[in-house]
Image (cartoon, grey):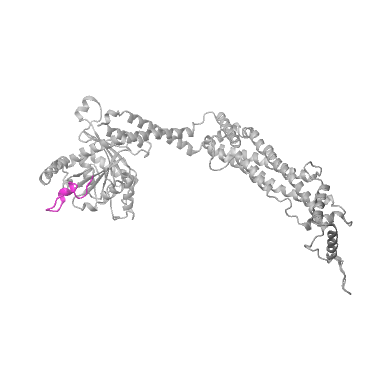
Amino acid sequence: METLIPTINRLQEVFLTVGAEIIQLPQIVVVGSQSSGKSSVLESLVGRDFLPRGSGIVTRRPLVLQLVNVAPLKERLKTESGVKAEEWGTFLHCKNQIFTDFQEIRREIEAETERSTSENKGISPEPIYLKIFSPKVLNLTLVDLPGITKVPVGDQPEDIEAQVQEMILSFISNPNSLILAVSPANSDLATSDALKLAREVDPDGRRTLLVVSKLDLMDAGTDALEVLLGRVIPVRLGIIGVVNRSQHDINTQKSLEDSMKDEQAFLQRHYPSLASRAGSRYLAKTLSRLLMHHIRDCLPELKTRVTVLSAQYQARLNGYGQPVEDHSATLLQIVTKFASDYCNTIEGTARYIQTSELCGGARICYIFHETFGRTLQSIDPLGGLTELDILTAIRNATGPRPALFVPEVSFELLVKRQIKRLEEPSMRCVELVHEELQRIIQHCSSFSTQELLRFPKLHDSIVEVVTGLLRKRLPITNEMVHNLVSIELAYINTKHPDFTDAAQVSASVNSQQAEALDGGKRWKNEKVAEERIPTAGFGSPSKGQAINLLDTAVPVSRKLSAKEQRDCEVIQRLIKCYFLIVRKSIQDSVPKTVMHFLVNFVKEHLQSELVGQLYKQPLLQELLIESEDTAQQRTEVAQMLEALKKANNIISEIRETHLW
């Protein structure tokens, strides 16, 4: 189990090289109020003075501290030629630079803090990574965070308290972290800010260890025995009391070894029953033990997480593709793939099938048989025609002579007017199919051909070529559909097999009227009705009044005679019969025309059009320039994948027998 903490340190270094925080590694996070003694506790764990000191917020960036136990210098000199120092430190931002003077380490921490934070005592979430090698330390990974403050000092931001708390919560929210809450003994534990924040993310206290600092500064006659025994506020991982160095000890440069001896003497005098379970040495052993057991518990899940992420990043890297070497082959491959996906989307055999809405060929089918078909069915064969319109057409077709039979000219005139109404929905059908063919371009670009997204210029050029092809075919298709209606208008085929003969319609209407009225009564009623209908413009004028026939108003509506009713009904039946024949023909021929002149033509000529327009040597280099985002993302994903592979190898080195 002794290898677990170094293993986590190695994993931390691996992921730091790619600047990733996707893996939440086990570590100990130190939390405490400003001037609660956090720095003294950390220095006692290291056994050296190396942290900046002063008033206000001194720690303004997270300090990730890795303690590595090494053999004493004498033993190392016998077996290896390494660093010629008993203790030393290294920073991640100072490549290959070794610090043997701990005062230099302090100055480097201060300088690095100033580089990323302003001089107004502001804070930064960017961590400083420090590794200390010493035979006097136990293997540990600690994170020192800025102290919790309440009131901004000087020109600090007004929300400095919120910033510090947000930073602390971002670290202790990691479920794989242990929380080392530092609270001074001379303050009320119930008001401890460190414990309050720890409770927010760890309400059960499973990850929290409490350190009660400054035991020697309690008021005379009081002690922290009840607190250390957990009778005031119980903490599951335990409560450990320590004695910090005083400011006088720091000023007189009292060594940490002497301070630890004095600490043990103080504990023996005031807390003899707890002396063996308190102090800085016991704290270091406890932290090392807790961290090792915590790593052991987290390792299976960590290994699973690394494996899953490796598969995900491998898939992402495959999606970005390889850098282009053969431009000609790459362009032909992408163009062929796009044309194939476009045609497959129309045919319904695309690899990526949408489930949220109809698209491609399914939508075209819906347009033909639902949208267009229902629109034609909703058109009334006699819509817009009144009986007066029909009667007027009959009279205009006979000229000055009264009509004995229904004139054929009036039927053709009226039926052409109704057939013309089929043109607008037919043209709209073409427009809807054209719009769907445009939508398929974006569908293929977004879902089917991921390779195409790597090259923005090629993508735009393909879209432009396909759009241009559709734009060229649209007027041709519109003209052909227009001609379909024009053909029907050009010749009214009254000999059509499905068309009812006019004589039969007339006989049918006469027989229906005969059944409704008997002979004598019918003649009398017609005679009376004709006498009651005034003849427009032929009334007897008053004496002395001028007559102007052209000024006589045409009646908007009036009661029709039986003959007029019969003629109107004959024309209506003929129009309806012929209109239904033409509508059926249009409903069948328009989709066929659209498919032949637009859809099928585009499918057959798409690839040749793309190759002809784009496969040109001067354009190859320009079209296959990758976007900067794609190149950068491929590099980042490749680096992350490499880091995950290294992490997987590191974790695999740990045998299961080493975990117990």
**Foreground of the two, 271 or 11:** 271
At 10% from the left and 45% from the top, the residue drawn is 269
**Foreground of the two, 175 or 404:** 404
Give x and y (percent) for residue 210.
22, 45
Q: Is residue 111 visible?
A: yes
**Toward which corner of the image does residue 109 lie, by quadrant?**
top left
Q: Which residue sits furthest left?
A: 269
Q: Is residue 645 above or below residue 395?
A: above
Q: Is residue 414 above or below residue 363?
A: below
In the image, taking residue 6 as reference, residue 535 lies left or right, namely: right
Q: Is residue 283 above or below residue 567?
A: above
Give x and y (percent) for residue 190.
23, 53
Q: Is residue 52 visible?
A: no
Give x and y (percent) for residue 258.
14, 41
In the image, taking residue 489 as reference, residue 168 lies left or right, namely: left
**Toward which corner of the image does residue 557 lie, by quadrant?**
bottom right
Instruction: Report if residue 231 lies within the magenta region.
Output: yes
Give x and y (percent) for residue 266.
12, 45
Instruction: Report if residue 55 lies within the magenta region.
Output: no
Question: In terms of secondary structure, what is the magenta stretch mainly?
Answer: loop
In the image, taking residue 351 as reference, residue 295 lies left or right, namely: left
Report the magenta residues as a range: 214-235
Task: Count numbered badges in the picture.
Answer: 0
At 61% from the left and 37% from the top, the residue drawn is 346
**Toward which corner of the image does residue 116 lie, by quadrant?**
top left
Query: Which quarter of the figure is the N terminus placed in?
Result: top left
Query: Which quarter of the figure is the C terminus placed in?
Result: top left
Q: Which residue sits furthest bottom?
A: 544
